[in-house]
Image (spheres, grey):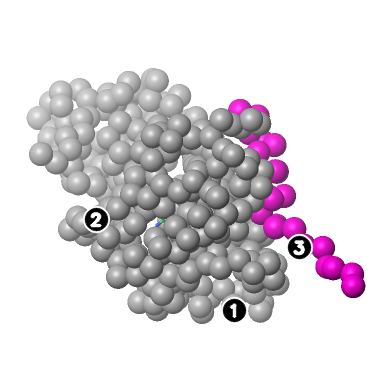
Amino acid sequence: MIMAAPLPNPCEQALAQWCACEPSLAAPSRMAVAYSAGADSTALLLAAWQRWPDRVVALHVHHGLQAAADGFESHARGFCLQHGIELRVTRVDAAHAPGQSPEDAARVMRYLTLANMAQQAQAACVLLGQHADDQAETLLLALSRGAGLPGLAAMPERFERHGVWFGRPLLALTSQSLRDWLRDSGHAFVDDPSNSDQRFTRNRIRAVLMPAWEACFPGFRAMLARSARHAAQAQVLLDDLARLDLAETGSPPLIRSLQRLTPERQANALRHWLRSSAGAAASAAQLDELLAQIAHCNTRGHQIRLKVATGFVVRDGERLRYTPPI
Ligand SMILES: Nc1ncnc2c1ncn2[C@@H]1O[C@H](COP(=O)(O)OP(=O)(O)OP(=O)(O)O)[C@@H](O)[C@H]1O
């Protein structure tokens, strides 16, 4: 009897291509995979384990608040035991701040926890399982919220957070291709029940918008990914321009120097200053108001005090200053 050859895991090629752009990861001493026990990170974990058999560590974050979290952890333990993959688990309880959604709080806590675990494991990088559908959803979500370029750039293939490198090697693969491979190869994974909860905007985009786009524009995911890359490139240029302008205005910026820039360049420089010095994201309305205040700041007595993010931008003599919340 002729045995069918095992199907190749599509993540293996995607991982090889991603690594080819990362010469520093040609021979990592340790590599971490953020493993939720869901479909995507399961396929990714198996590809990473195939590539670096003795150097992969799976990192699982147990979200204590979620009812199904115990089940995810026990599945993750069983799966890693079965394959001889080292697994590390950390339990977190991410309480959300007023005005912050529970999902955002959980995401922020997850990245911090993954970074800490990766440092303890001395891993060169943490690989994440987001794919082309996630990227398309992120872009559609950004468009629906009127996002600027940083939002339209969607998710980068690599980024640094909390002193640790994170990578997304699967951004060109569709969710369906990963699930088909897992099913055909007989690998088990868990489905997070909250992924089908229609109260979440992202889930409505997945259930309603994505099939409609696919019906009108087959293969639209690759096109959206291309748009996101264009936006990311343009954002790099805007960041370069902001750094040049802030070198002229000083940081914190001199009000008179800001006034010499066009309003668009002022807004770009201020956004960059607030983000890089205080981690503060100004809304479009807040920036408009700040630009109007700067334009009218022509006398010694002109005060500026504007709420931006959770703190205030104030006039401090000749300069602006950001005061974070106490
Ligand atoms: N609890 C967790 N522990 C470790 N990593 C996680 C966890 N939740 C998510 N991740 C990582 O973040 C990526 C994106 O998270 P997201 O919530 O979109 O995925 P998921 O549906 O929970 O899981 P998967 O992407 O594996 O199907 C995952 O692919 C995985 O790499």
Q: CA distance from mark 2 to mark 1?
A: 37 Å
Q: Amino acid at mark 2?
A: Asp
Label 2, secondary structure: give it. Answer: loop
Location of mark 2 (residue): 93
Assess whether residue 17 is covered by the magenta stretch. Answer: yes
Q: Are marks 2 and 1 in contact (CB under 8 Å)?
A: no
Label 1, secondary structure: give it. Answer: helix
- Say whether residue 264 is left or right of residue 296: right
Q: Is residue 132 above or below residue 203?
A: above
Q: CA distance from mark 2 to mark 3?
A: 39 Å
What stretch of residues is rendered in magenta?
Answer: 1-24
Residue at (30%, 70%) from the top-left corner?
Answer: 67
Residue 135 in percent (x, y) is at: 55, 58
Task: Say if disc 2 is inside 8 Å of ligand 1.
Answer: no
Decide: few, some or many residues near mark 3? Use Cα within 10 Å; few <14, some 14-19, many ≥20. few
Q: Is residue 245 above or below residue 202?
A: above
The image's mark for residue 161 is none
The image's mark for residue 7 is 3
Location of mark 1 (residue): 212
Q: Amino acid at mark 3?
A: Leu
- Say whether residue 232 is left or right of residue 104: right
Residue 20 in percent (x, y) is at: 70, 37
Which quadrant does the C terminus fall into?
Answer: top left
